[in-house]
């Protein structure tokens, strides 16, 4: 068993073979999709965490390094850094940085904050949000590099918090990359929220390929999204069609192919080219 935490505070527990606990994980993902809060970067983590036991949660640690010593902060720069020191509980609950300093700090202190943020790695959505709030040339340059980087969850955060920096072509490219090479089970949900609103042909094509190529849990949600974007489901995870979607949670190629053929029949599409490509791979 392994616990995976992506950089946007999604938590997943991966266990094989398919068990009741894994079933809870699938249900938790579906519940997160159904909830769809107004701010996608503030997904209902309490819902997602229902699949975790207290023992699992106790082992989760924030990836953030300490930012400031324990001395009492004085300047706006110090107060901003102090606000970045999140407890593990606040980190797991999705508490963000205190961005008020970015709006009230004087020019000199704002420059200090900017120097600090652009000189360190972008750890998760909080850094992306702070850089987007700064909206300086250096901050925008770092966000662009993050968008084109290898971390798909960070790229998703850039698309969420700095949409003005992302062209439709770039958005399509990064979504296709994230769908083609998912990096975490629950982190993919971030991408699917965006796919729900933006699904040009290349993105839909990546969903079809992913239904055959991805792991079972991911394939479940790719199939559900295809039904939605093709107008065959009432939501991005239609709970009424869950028994059909769960057919994709198998690693047996013949079973996955059978489910895929049924999906194509429901959608009225010819899936031959996807099956040929999958068998060739």
Image (cartoon, rainbow, N blue to C red):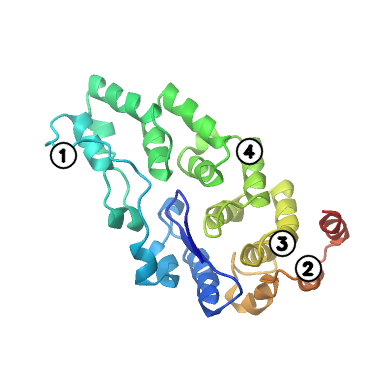
> Residue 109 at x, y = what percent?
23, 24
At horizontal 55% and vertical 69% (from top left) the residue drawn is 15
Percent position (x, y) of residue 171?
Answer: 61, 40
Give the spatial CA distance, label 1 vs label 2: 56 Å
Label 3: element kind: helix
**Occupied quadrant, residue 83:** top left
Q: Which residue is mark 3?
A: 211
Whether the residues at callouts 4 and 1 have beta carbons within 8 Å, the answer is: no
Residue 86 appears left or right of 265: left
Q: Secondary structure at mark 4?
A: helix
- CA–CA distance in space, label 4 to label 1: 45 Å
Q: For the residues carrying marks 4 and 2, which lies nearer the camera in this image?
A: 2
Q: Quadrant of residue 231?
A: bottom right
Check disc 2: other Cα within 10 Å, few if <14, some if 14-19, many if 20+. Answer: few
Spatial separation of the CA atoms under disc 3 and disc 1? 50 Å
The residues tagged by marks 4 and 2 sit, at their Cα atoms, a distance apart of: 34 Å
Which dot marks residue 168?
4
């Amino acid at each position: 068993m392994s616990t995976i935490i992506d950089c946007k505070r999604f938590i997943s527990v991966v266990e094989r073979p398919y068990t009741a606990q894994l079933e809870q994980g699938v249900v938790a993902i579906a519940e997160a999709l159904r909830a769809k809060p107004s701010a996608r970067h503030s997904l209902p983590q309490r819902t997602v965490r229902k699949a975790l036991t207290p023992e699992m949660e106790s082992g989760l640690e924030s990836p953030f390094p300490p930012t400031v010593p324990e001395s009492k902060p004085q300047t706006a720069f110090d107060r901003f850094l102090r606000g970045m020191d999140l407890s593990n509980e606040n980190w797991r609950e999705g508490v963000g940085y205190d961005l008020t300093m970015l709006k009230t700090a004087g020019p000199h202190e704002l420059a200090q904050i900017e120097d600090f943020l652009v000189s360190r790695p972008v750890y998760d959505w909080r850094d992306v949000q702070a850089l987007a709030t700064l909206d300086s040339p250096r901050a925008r340059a770092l966000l662009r590099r993050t968008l084109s980087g290898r971390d798909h969850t960070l790229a998703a955060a850039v698309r969420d918090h700095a949409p003005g920096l992302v062209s439709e072509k770039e958005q399509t490219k990064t979504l296709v990359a994230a769908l083609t090479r998912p990096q975490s089970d629950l982190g993919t949900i971030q991408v699917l929220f965006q796919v729900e609103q933006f699904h040009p042909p290349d993105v839909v094509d990546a969903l079809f390929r992913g239904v055959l190529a991805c792991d079972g849990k991911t394939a479940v949600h790719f199939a559900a999204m295809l039904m939605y974007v093709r107008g065959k489901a009432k939501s991005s995870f239609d709970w009424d069609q869950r028994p059909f979607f769960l057919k994709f949670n198998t690693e047996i190629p013949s079973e996955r192919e059978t489910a895929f053929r049924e999906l194509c029949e429901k959608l009225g599409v010819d899936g031959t080219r996807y099956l040929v490509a999958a068998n060739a791979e």
